Image (cartoon, helix red, strand yellow):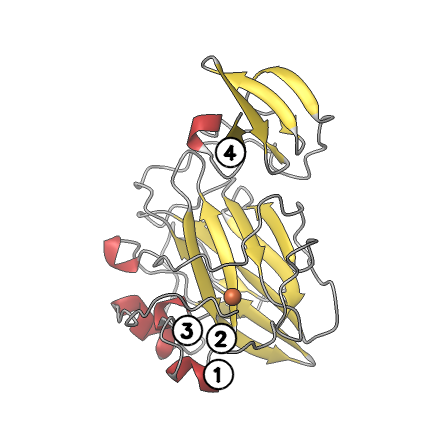
Amino acid sequence: MSDREEDRTPRITRKSLLRAALVVPAVPLLAGVPALASTPSGQPLAVTPESCDDDDLTPPQMEGPYFKPGSPLRTAMVDGAGTRLTVTGYVVGLACQPIAGALLDFWQADNAGAYDNVGNRFRGHQFSDAQGRFTLSTIVPGLYPGRTRHIHVKVQAPGRPILTTQLYFPNEPRNSTDSLFDPALLMNVQQVGSARQATFDFVLNVPGTPPSPSPTATASPSPTPPGGGGTWQPYQPYAVGAQVTYSGLAYTCQIAHTSLPGWEPPNTPALWRRR
Ligand SMILES: [Fe+2]
């Protein structure tokens, strides 16, 4: 089954043109703007958005038929053979401010172009760090009929709506024939030995405010036993199945996480489901 469910004309924006023409930048970084996404060796790969106004918002795309809630918390989801791929980048808001604690939930096809709709192969979620940065270790997804190569992702800043979108690879023959393909969603990809390193920065519709002090609670939460009970509280590790109440309503945890202010259950439908 293809997840092509609609035709969409690729949106050409200033940012997409920047990305399409992207080379390793020679321009100096702007003070206060998140630094370049970089390789582990520190080599810059991509331009972090020079501005993050409405025109630069990461565009949404269809979810497709293969999303499954409850993915495991992990930054590495290499569950089979394939060309190793590392994707790094930042989650930023309209003022290019880093967004800490943003939920990123990735899912993709395996090397043969198949999705695991029973288990959680090539599915995983994580949270951006205090600098708004994320790192995903995976493989280059395989092709399946009707689509070009892509990675699905949901991104949610604390207390904000979910952005559902897809990331694409440059120089793919099928990019020109896939009506969902949007050059604004091209990753910057480099071959490094036998592996590939990619970068992408998500610009979310979050008003620009000075970065607030970020709690360190997002790192490696150790889930509390399911069941839990009690009233929802921030800075609390919740496991899948944990049950809380908030404003008199009962919720069940869908994704293991450590709660933050702004992640109240009514604000985070990806994390909490009413029961
Ligand atoms: Fe897909």
Q: Are marks 1 and 2 in contact (CB under 8 Å)?
A: yes
Q: Amino acid at mark 3?
A: Pro
Query: Quick one: SS at disc 4?
Result: loop
Query: Quick one: SS at disc 3?
Result: loop
Residue 171 showing in the rendered view: no
Q: Is residue 48 left or right of residue 217?
A: left
Specify few, some or many for label 4: CA neighbours under 10 Å numbering under 14, 14-19, or 20 or more.
Answer: some
First reached walking from the N terminus: tag 3 or tag 4: 3
Residue at position x 67%, y 74% from top? 111
Specify few, some or many for label 1: CA neighbours under 10 Å numbering under 14, 14-19, or 20 or more.
Answer: few
Q: Is mark 2 within 8 Å of ligand 1?
A: no
Q: Residue beneath label 1, please?
A: 172
Q: Are marks 3 and 4 in contact (CB under 8 Å)?
A: no
Q: Amino acid at mark 4?
A: Ser
Q: CA distance from mark 3 to mark 4?
A: 30 Å
Q: CA distance from mark 2 to mark 4?
A: 32 Å
Residue at position x 40%, y 59% from top? 62
Q: Amino acid at mark 1?
A: Glu
Q: Nearer the viewer, mark 1 or mark 4?
A: 1
Q: Nearer the viewer, mark 2 or mark 4?
A: 2
Please tell me the numbered disc located at residue 25: 3
Q: CA distance from mark 1 to mark 2?
A: 6 Å
Specify few, some or many for label 2: CA neighbours under 10 Å numbering under 14, 14-19, or 20 or more.
Answer: many
Q: Residue beneath label 2, please?
A: 169
Residue 190 coordinates in the image, percent (x, y): 56, 77
